[in-house]
């Protein structure tokens, strides 16, 4: 399941380097430093960071994941595990899919077998007593963030506060899936979380997060269409809080980019240092195989961004620099 590509600079980021230079307690910190080095060594136009991918996504094999990333010319991929109901295949769609996402061990396997191409976060169901042990252990073994946190709890619940305190201790970002009345509920109260944990970099994602770029929103409409009304909650959070970023992945991110191009051009310009590209696409080959409609979300969102953004420097920030800087910040103590 390995492959070589001139786009993949595996000599920069290898597990062996970290394990040779640090014990398990500090290896993750040095890993963050190596992520920062990617930015310093890369030349313009050579790199693409995918902040949001999954192993075994709806049954996709590791080889198909590699093909998907290669087709979209992704340089570095962040794998987001989800442990619990999604691993067991808990949701069926009209297409008769079973939603499956690999867990921490699956992500670690892909990273280990493809050095220099993948990074990984850690995740565990916060309602389980073992969650902090699972997340901490994976961070100590090389994971560089917490997420995807996609579990049926409120964003300000006691269970999530435990996760945030661990993130604060370990100095890692937290990626949250916001979905109305389903996952990380209570987006309207999220500002209090941002205030309570100013040292944590949070990353917002999914339907309710991106629906709220508009001040006019039916919360039950997960993929709203039409013109965006200025003053949406997500827009305000990105403007008002330095520790929140936006993950542009999935159909929700693509919908936000394309529903109102005039608004999107301004939105991308204003938040050019707070937005990070990711795919969260589960097609089999980067061309749309295996999904209804036959369209690759990664390819679609990349095309939309390249059409909406005319400044190459802004495009590079969103496609690579913002994510690399955010992930690399783990390496430095924060006051």
Image (tube, grey):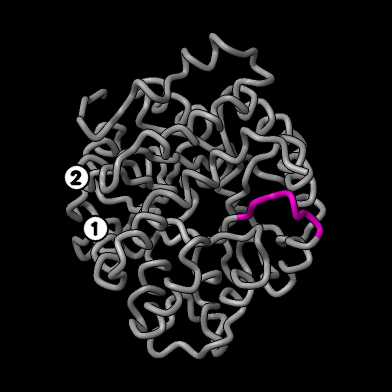
Alpha carbon of mark 2 to alpha carbon of mark 1: how far? Answer: 9 Å
In the rendered image, residue 50, in percent from the top left (x then y), is placed at 38, 47
Say which element carries label 2: helix
How crowded is the residue under tag 1: few (<14 C-alpha within 10 Å), some, or many (20+)?
A: some
Furthest-top residue in view? Answer: 20
Q: What secondary structure do most residues of the magenta stretch adopt?
A: loop
Q: Which of marks 2 and 1 is nearer the N terminus?
A: 2
Q: x%, y% of residue 80?
A: 49, 42
**Between 259 and 30, which is closer to the camera in this rendering?**
30
Determine which quarter of the picture holds residue 49. top left
- Which label was assigned to residue 320? none
Report which quarter residue 22 is drawn in: top right
Name which residue lies at 50% across and 64% down. 206
Q: Inspect this view and state whether residue 111 appears.
A: yes
Q: Is residue 102 magenta?
A: no
- Could you tell me which secondary element the residue under label 1 belongs to? helix
187 versus 101 height, above or below: below
Q: Is residue 243 above or below residue 253?
A: above
Question: Which residue was labeled with disc 1?
Answer: 299
Tell me: 142 left or right of 295: right
Q: Is 197 contained in the magenta span?
A: yes
Q: In this view, does 285 lie above or below 178?
A: above
- Residue 71 shows which numbered tag? 2
Q: Residue at x 26, y 24 (%)?
A: 1
Residue 314, located in which quarter of the rendered image?
bottom left
Quadrant placement of the C terminus: top right
Residue range of the region highlighted in magenta in the rendering: 196-202
Comparing 8 with 186, the one in front is 8
Q: Looking at the image, do the residues carrying marks 2 and 1 touch, with CB atoms under 8 Å apart?
A: yes
């Amino acid at each position: 399941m390995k492959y070589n590509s001139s786009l993949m600079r595996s000599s920069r980021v290898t597990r062996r380097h970290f394990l040779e230079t640090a014990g398990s307690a500090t290896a993750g910190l040095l890993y963050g430093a190596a992520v920062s080095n990617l930015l310093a060594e890369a030349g313009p136009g050579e790199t693409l960071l995918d902040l949001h991918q999954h192993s075994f996504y709806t049954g996709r094999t590791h080889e198909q994941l590699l093909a998907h990333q290669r087709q979209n010319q992704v340089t570095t991929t962040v794998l987001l595990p989800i442990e619990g109901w999604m691993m067991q295949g808990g949701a069926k769609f009209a297409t008769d899919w079973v939603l499956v996402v690999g867990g921490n061990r699956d992500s670690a396997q892909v990273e280990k077998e493809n050095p220099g191409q993948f990074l990984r976060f850690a995740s565990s169901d916060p309602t389980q007593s073992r969650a902090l042990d699972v997340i901490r252990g994976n961070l100590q073994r090389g994971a560089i963030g917490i997420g995807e946190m996609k579990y049926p709890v409120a964003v300000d619940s006691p269970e999530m506060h435990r996760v945030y305190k661990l993130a604060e201790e370990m100095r890692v970002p937290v990626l949250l899936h916001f979905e109305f009345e389903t996952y990380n509920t209570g987006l309207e109260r999220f500002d209090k979380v941002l205030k309570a944990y100013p040292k944590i970099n949070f990353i917002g994602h999914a339907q309710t997060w991106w629906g709220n770029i508009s001040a006019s929103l039916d919360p039950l409409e997960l993929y709203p269409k039409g013109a965006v009304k200025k003053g949406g909650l997500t827009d305000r959070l990105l403007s008002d809080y330095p520790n929140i970023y936006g993950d542009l992945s999935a159909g929700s991110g693509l919908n936000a980019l394309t529903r109102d191009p005039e608004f999107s051009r301004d939105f991308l310009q204003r938040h050019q240092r707070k937005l990070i590209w990711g795919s969260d696409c589960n097609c089999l080959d980067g061309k749309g195989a295996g999904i209804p409609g036959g369209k690759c979300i990664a390819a679609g969102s990349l095309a939309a961004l390249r059409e909406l953004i005319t400044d190459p420097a802004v495009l590079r920030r969103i496609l690579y620099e913002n994510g690399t800087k955010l992930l690399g910040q783990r390496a430095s103590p924060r006051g």
